[in-house]
Image: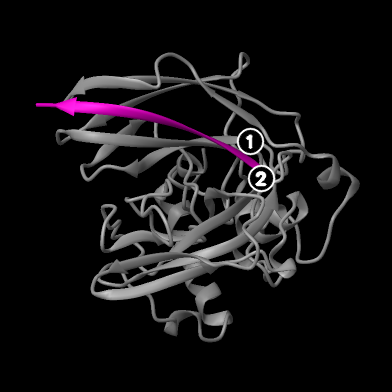
Amino acid sequence: MMFRTLEQSSGRTSRVVRLAACLLILIPGISLAQTYRSGQHVEPAYEGWRQNPDGSYNFMFGYMNENWEEEPDVPIGENNFFSPGEADRGQPTHFLPRRNRFTFEVTVPADWGDRELVWTLNVNGEERKAYATLRQDYLVDNMVIASETGSLGAGTSSPESRANIPPVLTVQGDRVRTARVGEPVNISTHVWDDGLPERRRESTNTEEELTSRMMRRPSQVTVGKINGLFLSWNVYRGEGNVTFDPPLPKPWEDTRAAANSPWGELWLPPEVPEDGVYEVNATFDEPGTYVLWGRADDGGLYHDGYLTVHVSE
């Protein structure tokens, strides 16, 4: 992975750090951007809607956690609810850092009409709302998803991107499990993909490539993402810390160059197991009920799966 490449020698690491410092100077205002590690709110986001074969609709939601480090836990209730109707519509209660797009979907009936569905979040004392409607300009298809997440440039497409279909994630074994604090839970996940969009990075980063990427100006006005199949597991609901081994790529837009994130400039897509089965161990540090969220992402499109774990002392 890229981390090994950056750490091969102290001299080389120093050169990369100096290049990063130069980049901050060359891009006006970037060093003055106001960002926060913790203490800020989470902005719920309505991403759009798509219709199901039976005539019903799926409203698609994500969020922007204004913190770079804090991952707030907000139980379903007065600080995390939908209206009208049921407060719990399957939304997360654990919020990863920064921008998370197309995180979950809520199904509404075919006769929904012009009503609004409202998601309300109150985090760190600030209340925010997202309003979902069936307005035509919120219609989402695969090209919109690929563009919004950075796989494509804004308003562009290609024969490859139009042919792409989402990967298929299958959690093997029971979907509800029990464990004890400190006891690893093995998660076997099979991921099938059609190989599109094609992988955009080789499996190594040479010093020349690192220099080029660190100094390259942004090539598109929207967020940029490196195409390549990966699997990520994270906490969706549950208030304790969960450690995943081996560490997996982030599903959120961490744009820092050396982040283990497809939105980071130096990221390399991981190797795909020959049999398509990923083995991951999850270890919990507190008792409770956890919902773990798995996402298979090929760069342009994604597929999600969930696992519930009841953890005792």
SS category of the residue bearing label 2: loop
Give yes or no for residue 287 being in the magenta stretch: no
Q: Nearer the viewer, residue 161 or 79?
A: 79
Q: Is residue 2 visible?
A: yes
State if disc 1 and disc 2 touch (CB < 8 Å): yes
SS category of the residue bearing label 1: loop
Q: In this view, does 158 lie above or below 222?
A: above
Dot 2 amino acid type: Gly
Span shown in magenta: 301-313
Please state the horizontal and vertical placement of residue 261, each as a whole percent of the image: 51, 49
Applied colour scheme: one colour
Q: Please tell me in which quadrant of the rendered image residue 286 appears.
A: top left
Please state the horizontal and vertical placement of residue 216, each as a whole percent of the image: 67, 66
Q: How crowded is mark 1: few (under 14 residues within 10 Å), some or many (20 or more)?
A: many
Q: Which of 21 and 246 is in front in this view?
A: 246
From the viewer's perspective, tell me whether residue 293 is left or right of residue 203.
left
Q: Estimate the spatial distance between the alpha carbons at disc 2 and disc 1, rounded to whole Å.
A: 6 Å
Q: Which residue lies furthest to the front in this view?
A: 111
Give the residue at mark 2.
Answer: 299
Q: Which residue is drawn at 76% across and 66% down?
A: 154
Give yes or no for residue 310 being in the magenta stretch: yes
Q: Residue at x 54, y 67 (%)?
A: 116
Please state the horizontal and vertical placement of residue 304, each as a whole percent of the image: 54, 36
Q: Main secondary structure of the magenta part?
A: strand
Dot 1 amino acid type: Leu
Q: Is residue 170 above or below residue 26?
A: above
Q: Is residue 264 visible?
A: no
Q: Nearer the viewer, residue 216 or 278?
A: 278
Give the residue at mark 1.
Answer: 229
Q: Please tell me in which quadrant of the rendered image residue 275 appears.
A: top right
Q: How crowded is mark 2: few (under 14 residues within 10 Å), some or many (20 or more)?
A: many
